[in-house]
Amino acid sequence: MRRRAARLVGAGPLTLLLLAASFALACYAGVRLLEDDWWGVLLWFAGAALLHDLVLLPLYALADRALRSLFRGRRRGRVNHLRVPAALSLLLLLVWLPLITRRRPAKYAGATGLSPEVFLPRWLAVTAALFALSAAWALLREARARHRSRTPAK
């Protein structure tokens, strides 16, 4: 049984069990999601996949290539200190875009009783904090590398 499971998924039976449970949960979520407006949901997924593959992927691949060309040479690892906060910030922007741009503030306020006015300043604050944390991490790494290079090996 263990060899058959390992041959099937490349790991042990626990992995196979977890994989089966995750597929069951995904199927249940899919059935619940498609219950009311299945055509709209499928159209949204297809549109999102096309938008990502045909527009967004070439754009951020081009931006990444330009960023890597700035960090040519021995300090190529520094590019990640810009990639990670930028990716997280753009992901947050994508998720909260309707509220950040205040497209339907009355509908949001009516449904939640909260004001959507706070989303833009909070997104900007989170973005600034992400870049500041990444810059602090880069400076700490640089200081540690300098300290190691000055300390003689024993």
Image (tube, rainbow, N blue to C red):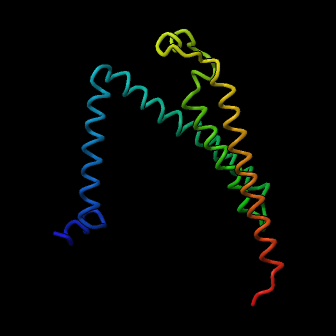
**Tally of numbered tags:** 0
- Residue farthest to the bottom, as pictured: 154
Residue plotted at (64% across, 47% down): 61
Q: Which residue occupies the foreground of this view, 139 or 55?
A: 139
List x then y, in percent, for residue 89: 64, 39
- Which residue is depicted at the point 56% across and 28% down? 96
The C terminus lies in quadrant: bottom right
Question: Is residue 132 rendered to the left or right of residue 34?
Answer: right
Give the answer, above or below, for where 19 lies relative to 143. Answer: above
- Res 26 → quadrant: top left
Relative to 50, residue 10 above or below: below
User: What x and y, as percent, mark residue 131?
Assistant: 72, 45
Image quadrant where residue 63 sits: top right
**Residue 48: percent from left, percent from top:** 48, 32
Viewer-proximal residue among 133 and 92: 133
Above or below residue 101? Residue 93 is below
Q: Position of residue 53 (x, y in %)?
A: 52, 40
Q: Which image quarter holds the N terminus?
A: bottom left
Relative to residue 149, is residue 5 drawn left or right? left
- The residue at 74%/49% (across/down) is 66
Residue lying furthest left in this view?
1
**Residue farthest toward the right in the current orientation of the protein:** 150
Q: Is residue 147 left or right of residue 91?
A: right
- Figure quadrant of residue 4: bottom left
From what the image shows, is residue 149 above or below residue 26?
A: below
Nearest the viewer among 94 and 120 is 120
Q: Is residue 109 left or right of residue 130?
A: left
Residue depicted at x 63% and y 24%: 119
